[in-house]
Amino acid sequence: MQFPTLETERLMLTEITEQDTDRFFALLQREDVTYYYGMDRLMEKEEALEMIRAFRVVFEFMRGMRWGIRLRGEEELIGTIGLNQLQLRSKKTEVGYELHPDYWRQGLMEEALSAVLAYAFDELGLYRVGATTYPANTGSNRLLKKMGFTEEGRLRGYLHQRGESHDALVFSLLAPEWQMQQRGN
């Protein structure tokens, strides 16, 4: 199966390849990018390469997809967004994303998330898209609510990062809610 490319007004969402290793590493070695990521920042470029190779394997087995976020007409990776724990039979997945701080607060992640949700619900036929965030990650929590996600609750001690356990908030968006939103637009 060919990896799907998604386009928005300002963005191209494409497969992340080994050619993106340097930029991906530069992104995930930043403490400000990974602070709410759910894993510690990368320390070695080899870790980035391993993650990119894992993205490909996960896609080949249809267990997930991770897109590189790029501005239209530019090759540089400015972030990633993906479907994690994809379960086609159970019609569910979780979404995760990160963006370089130079591109924060410009509506780019909303644009990328909208394209990925359309793909998840309309192309893959999923019923549920979930998301797990840190309670203190107000930007992400606000984005999810704006996109129609419902906060379902708190998972105590769910994420382990920076040597300690942290609570997480769980969000979900269901296909009928997505379809109603799309009819309203």
Image (cartoon, helix red, strand yellow):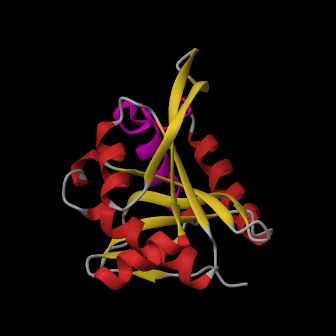
Identify the residue at image location x=80%, y=70%. 89
Q: Is residue 97 left or right of residue 55?
A: left
Q: Is residue 175 above or below residue 167?
A: below
Q: Along the line of sight, which residue is nearer the eye, 112 or 146?
A: 146
Q: Residue furthest top?
A: 164
Give x and y (percent) for residue 156: 58, 23
Question: Foreground: 81 or 139?
Answer: 139
Whether residue 42 is visible to the viewer of this picture, yes or no, is no
The image quarter in which residue 9 lies: bottom left
Is 128 drawn above or below residue 9 in the view shown? Answer: above
- Between 183 and 71, the residue placed more toward the observer is 183
Locate residue 111, reporting x and y percent.
32, 69
Query: What residue is drawn where x is 51% and y is 36%?
Result: 153
* Res 87 quadrant in image: bottom right
Q: Is residue 28 magenta?
A: yes
Q: Which residues are magenta?
A: 20-43
Residue 144 forms part of the magenta stretch: no
